[in-house]
Image (tube, rainbow, N blue to C red):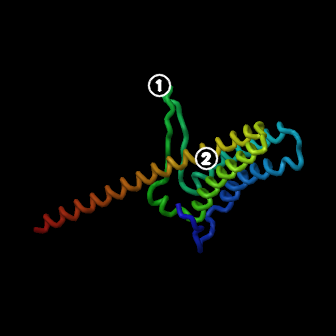
C-alpha cells in the first residue's frame, strides 16, 4: 500500500467516499464528544455501536465494491463449516480503479481501527471497563472489514498473477508455434 496520496486525479466516486468516511467519523466523534453532553452509558453505547454497524455495512456492501472493486462474505456450508467467499472485478476493471478512491478506502479502514485501539488504551488507563465494551464492538467490526478486504485483495492479486502467467505462457507458446510453422 502506497503511503502518499495519489496526486493529480480527483475522486471518481465522491459520494461513496463521503459515506465511506461519514459513519467512521460519526462513530468516533460521537464516542469522543458524548462525554461532554451525556452521562448515560446506554445512550453512548447504543448510538456509537449503531454508527459503527452502519459503517460496517456501508464498507462491506457499498464502498468496498465501488472504491476498490472487492467484495467478501462468509457462508456456512452443508457441513456446518464457515466458508469465506471473495469476489473481485476482472483484471481490466481493477486496473482502471481510481487510485485516490483506493487510497482513501484503505487508509480510513486502517486508521479507524488504530483510533479505536488508542481509545481502548485510554479507557484502560482511566479504568473505564464499561467503555471497553463499546470500543471492543466497534473494533471488532473494523477488524472484520480489514480481514475480509485484505484476504479479498490477496485473492485478487493471486488471480492477477495467474492471469498474467497464463497470458505470458500462451503468447510464448503461440510465438514458438508460429516460429516453427514458418520453417
Residue at the image point whose x is 59% and y is 55% from the top: 66
Residue at the image point whose x is 41% and y is 55% from the top: 160
Alpha carbon distance from label 1 to label 2: 26 Å
Query: Which x, y percent locates residue 63?
Result: 62, 53
**Above-or-below relation of 73 to 21:** above
Residue receiving disc 1 = 79
Q: Is mark 2 on a helix, strand or loop?
A: helix
Residue 157: quarter of image: bottom left
Image quarter of the C terminus: bottom left
Sequence-wise, the earlier of marks 1 and 2 is 2
Residue placed most toward the observer, 123 or 167: 123
Q: What element carries label 1?
A: loop
Query: Which x, y percent locates residue 106?
Result: 59, 56
Query: Which x, y percent locates residue 44?
Result: 81, 42
Which circle marks residue 60 in the picture?
2
Pointers 1 and 2 in contact (CB under 8 A)? no
**Above-or-below relation of 91 to 27:** below
Amino acid at each position: 500500500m502506497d503511503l502518499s496520496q495519489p496526486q493529480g486525479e480527483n475522486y471518481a466516486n465522491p459520494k461513496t467516499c463521503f459515506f465511506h468516511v461519514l459513519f467512521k467519523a460519526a462513530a468516533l466523534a460521537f464516542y469522543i464528544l458524548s462525554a461532554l453532553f451525556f452521562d448515560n452509558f446506554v445512550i453512548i453505547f447504543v448510538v456509537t455501536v449503531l454508527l459503527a454497524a452502519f459503517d460496517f455495512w456501508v464498507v462491506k456492501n457499498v464502498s468496498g465494491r465501488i472504491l476498490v472493486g472487492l467484495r467478501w462474505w462468509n457462508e456456512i456450508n452443508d457441513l456446518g463449516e464457515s466458508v469465506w467467499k471473495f469476489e473481485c472485478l476482472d483484471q481490466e476493471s481493477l486496473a482502471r480503479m481510481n487510485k485516490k478512491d483506493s487510497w482513501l478506502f484503505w487508509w480510513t479502514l486502517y486508521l479507524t481501527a488504530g483510533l479505536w485501539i488508542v481509545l481502548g488504551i485510554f479507557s484502560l488507563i482511566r479504568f473505564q471497563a464499561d467503555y471497553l465494551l463499546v470500543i471492543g464492538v466497534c473494533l471488532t467490526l473494523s477488524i472484520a472489514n480489514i480481514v475480509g478486504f485484505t484476504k479479498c485483495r490477496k485473492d485478487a492479486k493471486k488471480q492477477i498473477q495467474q492471469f498474467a502467467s497464463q497470458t505470458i505462457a500462451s503468447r510464448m507458446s503461440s510465438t514458438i508455434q508460429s516460429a516453427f510453422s514458418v520453417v
